[in-house]
């Protein structure tokens, strides 16, 4: 009986040292940023959105989870100045687009993670914009205390249809493409 107790105690000690807890790494919201690009027939616009909160979850040095909250009230246009900049930002924050007065955050939750190798992952996540959630797939690359991702989002899936040639006829050169691009830079 003593030998069995000693064996069980030894196994318990060994397993307690080999079990690795998940490690949450909060992003530095002052250094992390989302850069957006929206395109239309006659050109494009770019800007930024800041994070409100976010965390990457690691286990054994590998990404196993993540959750991010974008502060949509910080939506900023960077390719214009003056009244043109203010007009575009106001329109993007209006109900025609992101409705930031009623939906001041957008949320991204990791659902499935596949390791591609060399600190590269394919992520399937749930993206919520204006209270509407849909899956998105993208690659995440982690280097040291940074991570980057590029996403292409179909805005019409989130009830953002203003100027969409998929929903309105005869828009001509006023057509705004349904997809917009996000370049995400995370520092944690």
Image (cartoon, grey):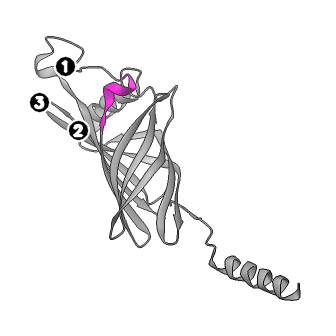
In front: label 1 or label 2 = 1
**Marks 3 & 2, CB-CB < 8 Å contact:** no
Query: Label 1 vs label 2: CA separation?
Result: 18 Å
Give neighbour class at mark 1: few <14, some 14-19, many 20+ (Cα, 10 Å): some
Label at residue 42: 3
Taking 82 as reference, is 5 above or below it? Answer: below
Query: Label 3 vs label 2: CA separation?
Result: 10 Å
Give neighbour class at mark 3: few <14, some 14-19, many 20+ (Cα, 10 Å): few
Give the structural element (helix, strand or loop) at label 1: loop
**Residue receiving disc 1:** 165
Nearer the observer, 160 or 141: 141
Q: Which residues are magenta?
A: 153-159
Image coordinates for residue 50, horizontal then vertical, percent:
44, 48
**Residue receiving disc 2:** 45
Total residue callouts: 3
Q: Residue at x 70, y 77 (%)?
A: 16
**Marks 1 & 3, CB-CB < 8 Å contact:** no
Asked if the magenta segment contains residue 12, the reply would be: no
In front: label 1 or label 3 = 1
Nearer the observer, 35 or 155: 155
Q: Residue at x 82, y 83 (%)?
A: 4
Give the structural element (helix, strand or loop) at label 2: strand
Image coordinates for residue 140, horizontal then vertical, percent:
36, 57
Quadrant (top left/top right/bottom left/bottom right) for the N terminus? bottom right
Q: Which of disc 2 and disc 1 is earlier in sequence?
A: 2
Would you identify the image quadrant in which residue 44 lies?
top left
Would you identify the image quadrant in which residue 181 lies?
top left
């Amino acid at each position: 009986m003593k030998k069995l107790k000693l064996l069980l105690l030894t196994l318990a000690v060994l397993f307690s040292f080999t079990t690795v807890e998940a490690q949450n790494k909060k992003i530095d919201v002052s250094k992390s940023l989302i850069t957006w690009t929206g395109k239309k027939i006659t050109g494009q616009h770019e800007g930024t959105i800041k994070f409100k909160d976010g965390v990457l979850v690691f286990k054994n040095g590998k990404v196993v989870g993540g959750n991010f909250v974008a502060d949509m009230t910080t939506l900023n246009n960077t390719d214009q100045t003056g009244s043109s900049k203010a007009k575009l930002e106001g329109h993007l924050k209006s109900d025609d687009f992101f409705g930031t007065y009623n939906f001041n955050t957008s949320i991204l939750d990791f659902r499935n993670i596949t390791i591609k190798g060399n600190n590269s992952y394919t992520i399937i996540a749930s993206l919520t914009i204006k209270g509407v959630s849909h899956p998105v797939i993208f690659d995440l690359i982690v280097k040291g205390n940074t991570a980057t991702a590029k996403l292409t989002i179909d805005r019409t899936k989130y009830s953002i249809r203003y100027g969409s040639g998929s929903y309105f006829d005869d828009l001509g050169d006023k057509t705004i493409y349904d997809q917009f691009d996000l370049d995400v830079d995370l520092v944690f």
